[in-house]
Image: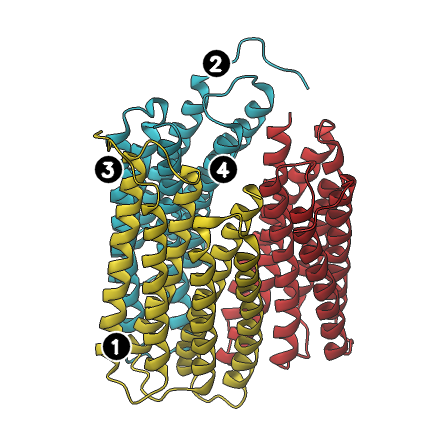
Chain colours: A yellow, B red, C cyan
Amino acid sequence: MLRWFLPREEDFFGFFERHAALTVQGAREMRRLVQGGQDIPAAATRIKELEHQADVITHDCVERLHKTFITPLDRDDIHQLITRMDDVMDYIEAAAFSVMLYDLTEMKAPARALADVLVRSSEAMAVAVGGLNNLKKADGILQACIEVNRLENEGDDILRAALAELFRGATDPLLVLKWKEVYEALENATDRCEDVANVIEGLVLEHA
Amino acid sequence: MLRWFLPREEDFFGFFERHAALTVQGAREMRRLVQGGQDIPAAATRIKELEHQADVITHDCVERLHKTFITPLDRDDIHQLITRMDDVMDYIEAAAFSVMLYDLTEMKAPARALADVLVRSSEAMAVAVGGLNNLKKADGILQACIEVNRLENEGDDILRAALAELFRGATDPLLVLKWKEVYEALENATDRCEDVANVIEGLVLEHA
Amino acid sequence: MLRWFLPREEDFFGFFERHAALTVQGAREMRRLVQGGQDIPAAATRIKELEHQADVITHDCVERLHKTFITPLDRDDIHQLITRMDDVMDYIEAAAFSVMLYDLTEMKAPARALADVLVRSSEAMAVAVGGLNNLKKADGILQACIEVNRLENEGDDILRAALAELFRGATDPLLVLKWKEVYEALENATDRCEDVANVIEGLVLEHA
């Protein structure tokens, strides 16, 4: 395997930051989608495109790992981090495609609330990711991680209330099933932001 | 960041043990809830309170990690362990809230059976956790881990039979969906006990 | 704990390989099951038997870890790998039991497509696993991991289209729920192959 002569350590942080920025963009696009009045297939296609760009970054990052002698964090940690970050985007894409494929055209308030939590959670995650190149400045990173954790709890509460409301007085079980899946995909995306925050918190601890 | 002058190593084991004790309490409260004849909102509120106490312990444990020079286990392992332990409690709370929010008042036998497995699984997990301060005495810990694994299989079998029974002759798809979610949350809680047991098994291996 | 005098390092790779071979067998059995015209309880029983054999290997592997001084990979990595490999088989068994317990006798095309992706994914996983005893020959291993990742995306696309088709024009919500569960178990099994591939990719990186 060809190895680079002069590995540029900082590139790994660049991968993380570009990946997180795409996730924030995807979350915002998703929030617009559930606000209603959108061309849903067009929005889902844009999200798929963002997801694809994130995939390419993940792939490039892993490939770079194989070509670099000295890495700024443990190889395994870099690998785990970028892999987990990818999961967030996958759930955003899943939520968008569920809305599209199930022909859900009338949007629901809890979907908007969940997408809003997701946007804020991905933004806080991006802040934590942005701090990785200076793990000694732990306070800002940890504060962002705490915010991601808090938002995950908020998302959980919204999901519970949303499901209770969805079932109460429902007449069409298939429609319940469809929205349940969209709500859960949105909440899962927020969950995965928390997984990323947990990995970052672990890294801060290791390098404290 | 302020660091403690004399870190007391044993405190981390105290966090684990108190956390595990709360989980056992939560599981037992859940078992009572599905035995029927309970004030369900009151029971769910008690479980939420236990979950909150466990959250505080998790938070304190992670904060202590940041203030302690020397830790009795790898920082990252402590972090992973307490995080995974927290997942068990989250699913117990989720199960309780599903019962409450879906207005399920007539309890079902498989829910009782699953909650019973969960209680025994959380108890075995607590035994494994209680052995962490002496990883050299591996036999007792590993036996508890094997018991957690066995119970997870038992829970799996109960869940399968329960779902088959639920669908067979069902007339109300929404009621099926609701109970399916409760059953799965209970089984997921048992699953997460197994995740904790797997982390502990890994720790025993590392320190053998 | 009794320790072996002369640990045979290569045995661990034997555990992995035998386990992966059982998973491939299980996936193929599952593919036959959803092709229709099978005695479903007999096929599910055969899959349960394969799952049990894989469980025994996992158990023996972990026990051997406790009795061996020098291991060819980190103890913790061996433990994580065999545990993740076990998850694949669990989902294959879950899919088979869902088909049986829900009395699904008329098979559906997407189940066949998903089972086919699963077979190919487990085969690629087995190739990656087979390369573990020579981590320096990274290229073949990584190519197999990339194939597992590609197949996971393929499975995802099939699942999405399958769910959309399932809901479209459905009249029996319970039947939708049943097939949804089978499809998702099959796709989850493919997902878990990707988890195994990710662990292996991490190992290649560590030992590069």
Residue B25 placement: quadrant: bottom right
In the image, residue C5 sits, relative to residue B89, either above or below, namely above
Mark 3 — on which chain does it sit?
C
In the image, residue A47 sits, relative to residue B135, either above or below, namely below
Name which residue lies at 61% across and 62% down: B91
Q: Give the number of marks.
A: 4
Q: Mark 1 or 3, which is nearer the eye?
A: 1
Mark 1 — on which chain does it sit?
A
Mark 2 or 3, nearer chain start: 2
Can you tell which mark lies on residue A43?
A: 1
Name which residue lies at 64% across and 56% down: B86
Between the residue at mark 1 and the residue at mark 3, the CA separation in whole angstroms equals: 33 Å
Q: Which residue is mark 3?
A: C143
Mark 2 — on which chain does it sit?
C
**Kind of residue sitting beneath label 2:** Arg
**Kind of residue sitting beneath label 1:** Ala
Mark 4 or 2, nearer chain start: 2
Can you tell which mark lies on residue C8?
A: 2
Q: Mark 1 or 2, which is nearer the eye?
A: 1
Q: Mark 4 or 1, which is nearer the eye?
A: 1
Residue sitting nearer the eye, A90 or C49: A90
Percent position (x, y) of residue C159? 30, 62
Between the residue at mark 2 and the residue at mark 3, the CA separation in whole angstroms equals: 29 Å
Q: Which residue is mark 4?
A: C80
Question: CB under 8 Å between callouts 1 and 3?
Answer: no
Give a yes or no on whether discs 4 and 1 share a subunit.
Answer: no
Between the residue at mark 4 and the residue at mark 2, the CA separation in whole angstroms equals: 20 Å
**Kind of residue sitting beneath label 3:** Gln
Residue sitting nearer the eye, A161 or B174: A161
